[in-house]
Image (spheres, rainbow, N blue to C red):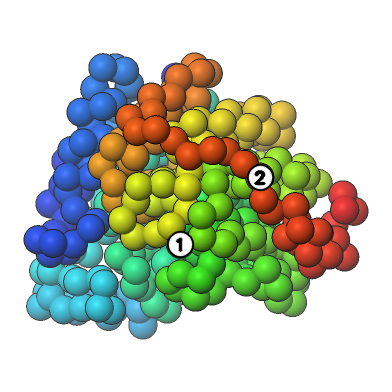
Amino acid sequence: MDTVLVFHPRYLDHDPGRSHPERRERLLATLKVLQPLGLPTLEPGPAQRRQVLHCHTERYVGYLEDLNKTGGIIDSDTHFNPGTLDIALLSAGGAIALGDAVMGGRAENGFALLRPPGHHSGRDFGGGFCTLNNAAVLMEHLRGKYGLKRFLVIDWDVHHGNGTQDIYYEDPSVLYTSTHQWPLYPGTGRMEETGYGPGLGHTLNFPLPPDSTGGDMLHVLQNGFLPVAGEFDPQAVIVSAGYDAYFLDPLASLRFCVETYSEATRMLRDFARLHCHGRLMMLLEGGYHLDGLSRGIEATIEALRGHNRAVEPHKPPEQHVGVQGQMKEFKRQVGPHWDVF
């Protein structure tokens, strides 16, 4: 089966401000790089209000509907123009369309090229460039329409996905995992944040110090997250795929390279084939260096297709691993909840 790309031209109309890093040129550069691949592409419709209310509160959705008429700001980084909610609903709808394509057998896996992003949107709040939580809308759609009960979320954006964590912190049906730079916005994602109540042990955070490389992230994925995920045995894998950990990204200080994303995707593709019929759905989050973003997404999609191809437009950093000491602490925090450790 094919790898499918999801995109809607109206994603280019989202305008958070002329000098804003989350600008339309991110997708234009990516589409130019992806065009020679000839991917089957889906153009989604919008998510419905009732679908959004499965993971966001009535109060928050009503607040967004009011902003959609007048414009305003959610926070200092997240500007809202009249019509922004319409595009955000198309972004959430893109996640749903990807889920339907995979579950309907039209594709084994796929990548949704979305704007605005979503992982900083919690049950009752937005921010950090995000309006609606695309990953959460997707999971609740898969739960309601197809009866899936266990979801693995891999979040490799350089910023912690505080919104996704907020929505599922007490939910044992979602194993949320995140590597992210620490310290950095939004200031959440400490290793000891492991869930609450019935969700205890189902949030796995591995904060990385500045200058950590892709080798560090791959070590965490292979030796920390995936062993627990294997025990959890998910029915679908959702990736919050940010590319702002790229070593030249202007908003952070991690040192991933294009090959990092290729290798991580290959690992997840193999995992998904072993555990959940290959159901691997990737949703764009951040990434603000145009070469790193576009080539990182290209490498991701090529790995989804089973091709070992990663174009490094700039000299990448050394891929050393320096997180062994942190891994001991991670296993100490997580070990009481999982037999694998």
Amino acid at the residue labelled 1:
His
Q: Which residue is drawn at 18% across and 38% down?
A: 28
Q: Tell me if mark 1 has few (under 14), some (14-19) or many (20+) residues whose alpha carbon lies within 10 angstroms of its own.
A: many
Amino acid tagged 2 = Val
Along the line of sight, which residue is nearer the eye, 326 or 274? Answer: 326
- Tag in front: 1 or 2: 2
The residue positioned 35% from the left and 47% from the top of the image is 248
Residue 201 visible in rendering: yes
Q: Which residue has dot 2 on it?
A: 321
Residue 132 in the image, given as x and y percentages of width and height: 36, 64
Report x, y in % for residue 39. Answer: 33, 21
Q: Which of marks 1 and 2 is nearer the N terminus?
A: 1
Q: How far apart are marks 1 and 2 (CA)?
A: 20 Å
Question: SS of the residue at dot 2?
Answer: loop
- Residue 15 figure quarter: bottom left
Where is residue 316 drawn, in percent x and y?
A: 44, 35
- Residue found 26% across the figure and 42% down from its top: 290
Q: Which residue is drawn at 13% across and 69% down?
A: 81
In the rendered image, the vertical position of residue 308 relative to residue 315, given as above or below: above
Mark 1 sits on what residue?
159
